[in-house]
Image (tube, rainbow, N blue to C red):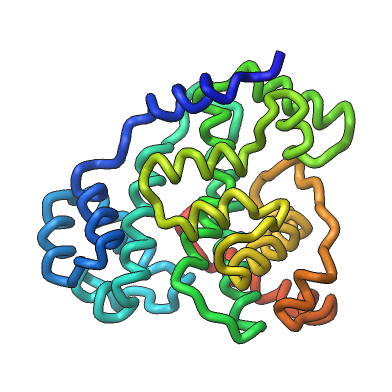
């Protein structure tokens, strides 16, 4: 029996929101009123989020290992948009620590997600594209799976069995069992948390590329997800690999040889990144 969408929405609304400090920062960014001083003041009240922000900021992803010692350093070196992304990423990591009866292996889940974030940036660099949303979009693209794991375990087990029986993409199994997929679930959650529309849209469309915002990030993320699955980094969808659309490569002005040339760099950056190892 397929889940009722209204029931799904009600379960999402049950999810605890972010800490007050994070809600304030999201609100300030949405209003365009954030600056270094008020960001420092807000995060001074939340040592846990601040510590996680600095940990990610000093990871190999950003290339400033050991140089960022404070929120002010992070703002000055990485810029406010990147610090916003780090704050929200840290808050999400804190919100989904995993449970004893989890179906998902959370370490493998976050390893895959970080690898996609890294690969998205590598692809965008190769294509000479820039976006402040690339890191966060890559890190949270599969967040809908965590909702399945937390609130719809019975259905999730059926989805996994369906995917094994039919050897189909996980999104097809999700649609068959629940009439909604993890990308749509993730977008619903992010919208309820008042994330920017761009991030919501990229999350919702990272499989089907029915795009409303930021074609560069969406195309890069789509490719990154496929490459990371091909490299078997972390665990996602039983690593069922989707075909690459020529339209995606055309938009980024890349070819298959370009992608193959990026694989060693992606693998190295993931290996060097200590966050989820």
Depth check: 122 or 130 in front?
A: 130
Depth check: 200 or 260 in front?
A: 200
Image quadrant of residue 44? bottom left
Q: Residue at x 61, y 73 (%)?
A: 216
In the shown orientation, is residue 47 left or right of residue 67? left
Image quadrant of residue 263? bottom right
| Residue 277, visible in the rendered structure | no
Q: Residue furthest right?
A: 166
Depth check: 221 or 57 in front?
A: 221
How many numbered marks have been drawn onto this rendered protein structure? 0
Q: Residue furthest bottom?
A: 128
In the shown orientation, is residue 48 left or right of residue 102? left
In the shown orientation, is residue 173 left or right of residue 189? right
Q: Residue at x 18, y 63 (%)?
A: 39
Q: Position of residue 77 (x, y in %)?
A: 30, 80
Does residue 41 sit above or below 92 in this rendering?
Answer: below
Does residue 195 sit above or below 165 in this rendering?
Answer: below
Does residue 272 sit above or below 186 in this rendering?
Answer: below
Q: Looking at the figure, which quarter contains the N terminus?
A: top right
Q: Position of residue 203 (x, y in %)?
A: 56, 52
In the shown orientation, is residue 53 left or right of residue 198? left
Q: Position of residue 250 (x, y in %)?
A: 79, 78
Q: Residue at x 44, y 45 (%)?
A: 190
| Residue 194, visible in the rendered structure | yes
Q: Residue at x 68, y 25 (%)?
A: 178
Q: Position of residue 52 (x, y in %)?
A: 31, 55
């Amino acid at each position: 029996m397929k889940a009722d969408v209204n029931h799904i929405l009600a379960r999402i609304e049950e999810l605890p929101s972010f800490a007050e400090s994070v809600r304030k920062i999201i609100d300030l960014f949405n209003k365009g009123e954030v600056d270094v001083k008020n960001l420092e003041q807000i995060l001074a009240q939340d040592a846990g989020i601040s510590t996680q922000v600095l940990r990610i900021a000093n990871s190999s992803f950003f290339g400033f290992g050991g140089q960022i010692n404070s929120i002010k350093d992070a703002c000055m070196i990485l810029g406010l948009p990147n610090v916003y992304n780090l704050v929200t990423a840290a808050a999400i990591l804190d919100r989904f620590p995993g449970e004893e009866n989890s179906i998902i292996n959370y370490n493998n889940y976050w390893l895959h997600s970080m690898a996609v974030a890294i690969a998205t940036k590598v692809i965008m660099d190769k294509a000479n594209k820039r976006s402040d949303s690339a890191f966060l979009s890559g890190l949270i693209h599969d967040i809908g799976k965590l909702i399945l794991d937390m609130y719809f375990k019975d259905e999730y087990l059926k989805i996994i069995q369906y995917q094994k029986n039919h050897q189909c993409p996980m999104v097809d199994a999700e649609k068959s069992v629940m009439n909604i997929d993890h990308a749509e679930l993730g977008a619903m959650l992010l919208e309820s948390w008042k994330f920017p529309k761009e991030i919501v849209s990229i999350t919702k469309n990272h499989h089907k590329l029915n795009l409303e915002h930021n074609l560069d990030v969406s195309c890069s993320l789509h490719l990154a997800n496929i490459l990371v699955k091909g490299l078997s980094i972390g665990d996602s969808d039983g690593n069922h690999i989707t075909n690459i659309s020529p339209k995606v490569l055309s938009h980024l002005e890349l070819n298959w040889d370009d992608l193959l040339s990026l694989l060693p760099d992606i693998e190295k950056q993931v290996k060097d990144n200590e966050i989820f190892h």
